[in-house]
Amino acid sequence: METLTDRITRYLLARIRRLAILDLYERAAVVGLLEADFIVEGDETSGTIWRVPEQSLRLLDAEPVRVRAEIMRRLGKAPYKTTAIDVLIRDLPGEPPHQNVRSAPKDTTDRENLAVEGRLESQPVAASSASEAPSASRKFLALLQEHVAPPSVAHVAIALLVARAVGTSVPDLSALSAVLRNPGAFVLIKAPVGRFERRFGLMLEDGLIVPYWAKLEDVHRSSPLSDGYGDRRRGKTRKTIKTLAGSDVPKAVERSLSRFLVDVLLERSAPVVLADETKTALAPFVSMTADLVLECRGLDHELIAELLQTCCGIAPKQSLRQMEKMALDLEGLSIDALALAVRPGRGLEHILSILEVLGERGRSSDKSGDDDDDGRGSGRGSDRSGRPKVKSRFLIKDGDDPPKSVDGIDVVQPEKAAEASGEEGGGGVSVDPANPEHSRLRQLRVETLSGYGDARDWALDLKADLQLWRDGGLAWSEMSTKLILSGPPGTGKTTYARALCNSLQVPLLVTSVASWLEPGYLGDVLKRMSRAFELARENAPVILFIDEIDNIGSRFGGRREQHDDYWRSLINRLLELLDGTAKTDGVIVVAATNLPEKIDPALLRSGRLEKHVAIPMPDMEALIGILAHHLGADLAGVLASAPSGRPKTMKAERQRQVLIERDADVINESVPGVSRDA
């Protein structure tokens, strides 16, 4: 008797094959092997008629070998791209997957539309004329479908895991359908396998899990389950699904996440799906409140054997026997590892030997705690064993050593103000007892900087406001806490941020847009971006310094048209994060750029990076102040060592005297205690 797991497996594999056939038909239409017509009902396109043209039917007059060769030759000229034809699905789990396409003539029977090889797939094909026998079209389609792309290893692995989760968690199909028909259902699916969350999200978008194309919207502003990149399959009518990644739940503030989740559930406008790849139990506010919890154990020998049979045609008994002989340990393997090992043309022993090595490396990474938090490791936000990471905090207690970086973000602790004690001044600034004022001036603080103009005034005002805020005399919303610095390379924008850290006596987080963009995939990039702001909120008061902010581009710059959706998503997310800091006390944002004209105007509006200061190259006065700062106590000796040779003319002597007097006045103002006579 067929079990529920078997029925769900058959259903999901049929959906995978259906999408592969649709992609094949579009490629065939590009090179003229098929023709596509749309069925329009009202204002919507409800289906597609695929027609076999006369020229394709004439190919059948040749020998089958030649027909196959000609089809292969023509398909070789068609690009491998995803279908742009929207096909709505009305099938339910366990039922034959019918494509919502219609055949012509309309009086053909359902039996005439059965697919070749005995599969119950509706044939989306019509003969080229009403008098044409449909058998010729079916024969041509049978030859065409020999070129269907093999199923993706990642798709099959996810399908098998989902089927097992359903089969082991639901008593029968009616119980599953009862929950799924609820428009606001909350479903938790858990499979402790690395990269399950992301691959599951991609399949949701492509209509390979549920019977419709989906648009994923994250519940809690963190990275979505998939890329969320619309270029993959455009022109789709999509239904919204609210999503959560289980590995992101432990890193979110429970109170905030539960509030967002409750708001979505009360709206009942879209189902909520939480995909979890971690091995530990989630917090009760999600694990115990879901309408349906689907859970499986993960990878085992039986699942791998079924995967190899589906993707490579290897007999399950042969695979099981070889895995038992090798005592193959699947712990540490991810979905991506399976895709790397199971490749066309590889034999069973070769595949299993690769899995053995990859699994061993994954397990060793678990022991060393070497987790790749950008999403390219085995899990999202968890180590490779699935254990959720502890929330990163870097507030330092007395006697602790400050960390150098957290989650790839450099952490700079403020140096304590130097005191004339002859010892380390708390922050590593040594003090000269003979010249304590000079030691304090050599410490990097905004007060000792030269050439920063309005940026220096802004910092001093912020320092005064910060003390009032700490004393309860000023609301954070009344303070100016966001600044963007622009100027040529080398004008000291990063130095300013470090000086601000010391002046305000709050930690500094240093990140950059370049580090955000390093993973490449949109979901991972958004995750890195969000993590920087999340870390700032967790450790407020703090300064978040974002370097190279011009790299995020502008929605109106016109230089990235081919990936417009990608960059628009990044900019919109950064706008949300900046707006979020306005509602969070204690987060100071300073951004730097060499090219301010390339920044999206929305980033510079009120409440965001509203204060803009351009830092020019230092003039003579600024250079004198910079030299005075770095020379410190040595300044008097350097001035005393200036050459005093007689100038050649009286005019040169007068010019020299004027310069000396001017420089002495500037130095006296910058360095109190230095005599003009020196």
Image: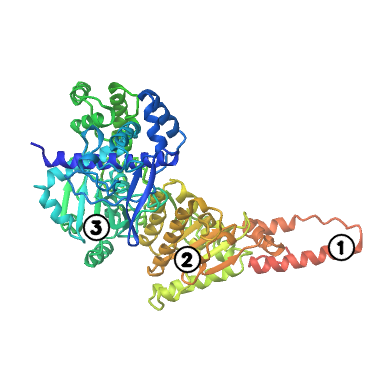
Between the C-alphas of marks 3 and 2, the distance is 43 Å
Image depth: mark 3 or mark 1 in front = 3
* Residue placed furthest toward the right: 649
Tell me the amino acid under the disc marked 3: Val
In the image, residue 103 lies at what x, y percent?
29, 46
Q: Label 2: which residue? A: 504
Q: Quadrant of residue 64?
A: top left
**Which mark sits nearer the N-terminus, 2 or 1?**
2
Is 386 positioned to the left or the right of 579 in the image?
left
- Label of residue 272 in the image: 3
Q: Which residue appears at 25% of the width and 37% of the height?
A: 115
Residue 129 sits above or below residue 447 on the image: above
**Which one is nearer the viewer's eye here, 301 or 162?**
162
Farthest residue to the bottom: give it: 473
Q: Is residue 217 visible?
A: yes
Residues marked 3 and 2 touching at CB (< 8 Å): no
Of residues 42 and 60, the one drawn nearer to the viewer in this rendering: 60
- Give the residue pinned by disc 1: 653
Closer to viewer: mark 2 or mark 1:
2
- Give me the residue at 47% from left, 65% from top: 504
Q: Counting residues from the N terminus, which is met first, the one under dot 3 or under dot 1?
A: 3
In the displayed structure, would residue 125 be above or below residue 348? below
**423 sits left or right of 286 in the view:** right
Helix, strand or loop at label 3? It is strand
Measured as percent of width and height from the top left, residue 446 is found at 55, 64
Residue 27: percent from left, percent from top: 41, 40
